[in-house]
Every structure is written in structure tokens, then in C-alpha cells.
Image: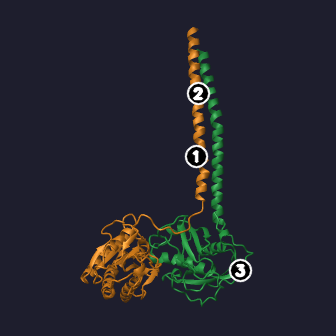
Amino acid sequence: MLLQVRNILRIRKVFLFAALCMVLAGAAIVCSSQTPVRSSPAVQGAQSAPISAAPSPQSGVPGSVPAPFGTQTQHNGLNVVVLDPAHGGTDPGARGTGGIRESEIVLDLATQVRRALELQGFQVVQTRQGNENPSFDDRSATANAQRGAVFVTLHISSTGMPGTVRVYVNSDLPPVTNANGLIPWERAQAPFLGLSRKLGDLIQGQLNQRFKGSPDAAQAASVRQLRTTAAPAIAVEISSIIVEDRAELDRMGPGIADAIARGAAAFKPSYIVPSAPGALP
Amino acid sequence: MSSRWKFWVIGGLVFVLVAAAIFVPILRRRVKRSARLQQQSEEQARRELTQPIAINPGDPRVKTKLFWAADAETSTLAPVVVELPLSNDPVLRSKQVLNVLLAGPVDAELRTLPPDAVLLAFYLLPDGTGIADFSEALATSIPSGIASEQLAVDSITRTLEASVPKVQRLKILIHGQEVETLAGHLDLTGAFVVNTKPGQPPAMPAANSPSTAPAALTPEKAPGKTGAARAETEISSSIKR
């Protein structure tokens, strides 16, 4: 009997202890459940806050690029072509129904264009050699590091009449106003727009002769890649990724390579390094 | 011994009772709150989606031009003259025309914007900069390429130019965010020039020939015909959210 009483007393102690634990656990849950619920309206409020409208300049890129209008060295003109096979790495670019990828085709095309340009006596620099994806700024930096270079970015479109090629130059940019000899990175293309158009027209003219249905002059478009490039720069876009077979695009390779090389060669005499910002030929 | 078992059973029941007394009200409160939150956000989303589509039949019917593709092959735009009841408020008017543009032309081949793209919001700043916030589908469903992306932006800017002279520049956001490019090519970091001559009396439209120049690059172009006198509403009052 005595044993039983002691037993009961012990059990009661255990029970009280367990009840206390339960109460504490309950209190903890109440607290934790309150926190997220209370924070939700705050998050909502933040989301519906007015958005900033002003287009903020990008951060994390060099503020400016040295202008090619040097005082010390006058260049004889164009001798380097920077070729940019677009996309690559995790970004396959446009994809066709047959599984063909823009990033792979333009890389192969770049090799052909490179050969044709080297035959014309140009030195060629590529923004990527393999299946990697440099940023827009990295690609521009490759071009901006060269002196007396032009920049050609290669693309395949998703639309348009198959078998045609279009050349794009950057849309008008606000003119560069600071006279300290530095071009703002964000608008590096601005002083070169006239030259870019000339180069674009020459290459588009060559393409027009080889690929019927292509335009006869370069078109303007707000191409991100061109904006930060401080050199005469064009984008060449081939139509299109919707072809049944990759071979159709590969067959265009030699013609495109030849057109770009001849266009660049024709552009060479008109590429005189300007003496001051804004004073373009 | 049986009394000990009885004690255990009663003890267990008391445990359950205490636990239930603590948890059930908390659970009920949490369920109620989360239900209310969900209801709120759904309501918000619905309001955002349906609000701009509201075309008020009481508005004056106006002949305006919408720009869709001229044909499926070449990357040019052609104006299509339509008569729509359009609001005099530039923000509402922009939403109305852009929604019609997104809905697409009769011939689906000629659409310039993906069918699943939605205009989430439109704002107009006092300096004439319009801000169009589109759903992610605009960036993800559009055919990737310079030609197709430029065509999409041109169709938006030229349609706004023809219908809403107050919008002088256009900034495009994707799901409320500023993005670098539309789908890997077209630069969305800046604002596109829509119209540099605000508030002018609407000019007579030129012949309905398909024009090829991108709107963003032709600031000297006269605004398109809108047909209705525009009330001088206070723009800043229409910037909401």
C-alpha cells in the first residue's frame, strides 16, 4: 500500500512535469505562429510600394572606357575584327524544332568568318572560343580593349524568311557630352553610330547580293550588345532557326563569311580614327 | 494494479484535453488568417488583371491605329484602323489600346506579342514617360531574336504613339522589374522614344501604307490620328500604387 502511494506520488510528479512541458511548448508555438503572420502584411506593403520609374544605370560595370581619340597615337585604321558568337553556355539562344541551337551554329559560323577575315589580312579576336556565356559587358570589353577594331555579333533569328540575312546597327543614342575624352560605358556606341551604319550598309550590301530577299541597307534596332561597344559595331542576324535541317543554315556559312570579310575590307579606308569626340567622319 | 491503469488512462486523457485546449484555437486562428491572406492576394491579382481591360461603352468611340505585323515573313509593321471606345484619361487609354494590341489581330500569324502576355500595370509620369509593366510571358514566350523583339517593342510604341499623345517615352518592365533585355537581344534598360510632340492636335493620318521605320527611332514623326479632344487631366493624379 505504501509502495503504491509512493508510486502514485511519483507518477503525479511526472504528470505535472509533462503538463508544464506541454504548456511551455504551446506557448512557444503561439509565439512562432504569430511571427510570420504578422510579417506578411509588411512584405505585401513593400511589394505594392511605388516602383522607381527612372531607368537606373547599371551597376557593376566600368564607368567609362578610354576614348580611342588618342592624342599620342594616331592609328592607321582598321586592322582587328572582334567576332562575337552570341549566347553560349547555359544560354542556347534561339532553338529550332530539330533541337538545333543558335549558340552552336554561330560558334561554327564564327570559325568560317574568322578564316575569311584572316584571308583579307585582318587580325581576328573572338569573344568566346567554346561553349561559354560571357556577359554583354564582358563581350563589349573584349572589343573595347582593342584599338582600331570593329565588332560583329552573330545571331540566328526565330522569325523571318529563311535564307535571308539582316544587319543591324544600334538605334540612336543620346550624344556623349562630356569633353574629358572619356566615353560613358553605358553609351559607348554613341560616337561610333555613323561608322557603324557605314560598316553595316557595306556588309548588308554584300549579303544582299548573295542572299535574295535580304534588305539592301542596315536596319536600326536597340541591340543591347552593341550599346556598350566603343567601336563600329553591327549585329548580323540570319533567318532562321525554324529551318528543318541545320544543314540549310550551314550552307549559308561561306556566303556570310565572304560577305562580312569583303564588307569589312571595303570599310577599311573609311575608318579614320576621329580626332575629337563627336567629330566623326 | 487496476487503479494504476485507471490513473494512466485518466492521465492520458487529461494530457490530450490540455493539448487540444492549447492547439485547437491556435490552429483555427492560423487557418483563418492564411485563408484571409490568400483571399486578399487573389483579389489583388484579379483586380490588377481585370482592371485595365475595362472598356467603358460610355466612352466616345475613336478611330485609332494599332500596329501589328505587315506579313508573317518580313519584320515590318502595318497599321490597322479600328474604332474603339477609349477613355480620355491617358493611363486608362494606354491600358485599353495595349490590351487590344495584346489580344492580337484577326489573323494570328500577324501578332507581334505572345498571346499569353498580359499588361499588369501602366503608369504615366509627369514628364511624359509611360511605364508599361508586362507579365513574364512577354519575355519568355516571344520568339528570341533581334528582329522579333524589335518588332514587338515597335508595335507597342507605335500603337501608343498613334493613340496616346501624352506618352512621350516608354519604359518596359517585366513583372515589375527592370530587365536588361527582352529575350536576350533587345535593350530594355532605357526608355523608348514614343512621341516628342505632346498635346498637339491630332494630325490627319497618312495613307495606310505599311511603314518600316521603328517608332523608337522616328521622334520627328507626327502623332497619329486620335479623333477626340483630350481632357487636360492631371497626370500625376493618375499615378497610383
The relative height of residue B13 versus residue A9 in the rendered view (above or below) is: below
* SS at badge 3: strand
Q: For marks 2 and 3, give the one nearer the viewer.
A: 2
Residue ID for mark 2? A20
Provide residue B27's location: percent of width, then percent of height. Answer: 63, 40
- Name the residue: 57% across, 63% down: A51
Relative to the observer, which residue lies in front, A30 or B76? A30
Report the amino acid beneath label 2.
Leu
Quarter holding the N terminus of chain A is: top right
Q: Is B12 placed left or right of B72 in the picture? A: right
Report the amino acid beneath label 1.
Pro
Q: Is A66 placed left or right of A31 in the picture? A: left
Quadrant of residue B98 within the rendered picture: bottom right
Do the CB atoms of the residues marked 2 and 3 lie less than 8 Å apart? no
Residue ID for mark 1? A36
- Shade representing chain A: orange
- Name the residue: 57% across, 81% down: B196
Quarter holding the C terminus of chain A is: bottom left
Do the CB atoms of the residues marked 1 and 2 lie less than 8 Å apart? no
Residue reaching furthest to the bottom: B207
Provide residue A280's location: percent of width, then percent of height. Answer: 39, 85
Residue ID for mark 3? B61
Q: Chain of mark 3?
A: B
Q: Could one spot residue B232 in this view of the protein?
A: yes
- Mark 3 to mark 1: distance in Å? 50 Å
User: Which circle's residue, 1 or 2, is located before the other in the chain?
Assistant: 2
**Colour green, chain:** B
Q: Chain of mark 1?
A: A
Residue reaching furthest to the right: B58
The relative height of residue A86 versus residue A13 in the rendered view (above or below) is: below
Q: Is A122 placed left or right of A184 in the picture? A: left
Quadrant of residue B130 within the rendered picture: bottom right
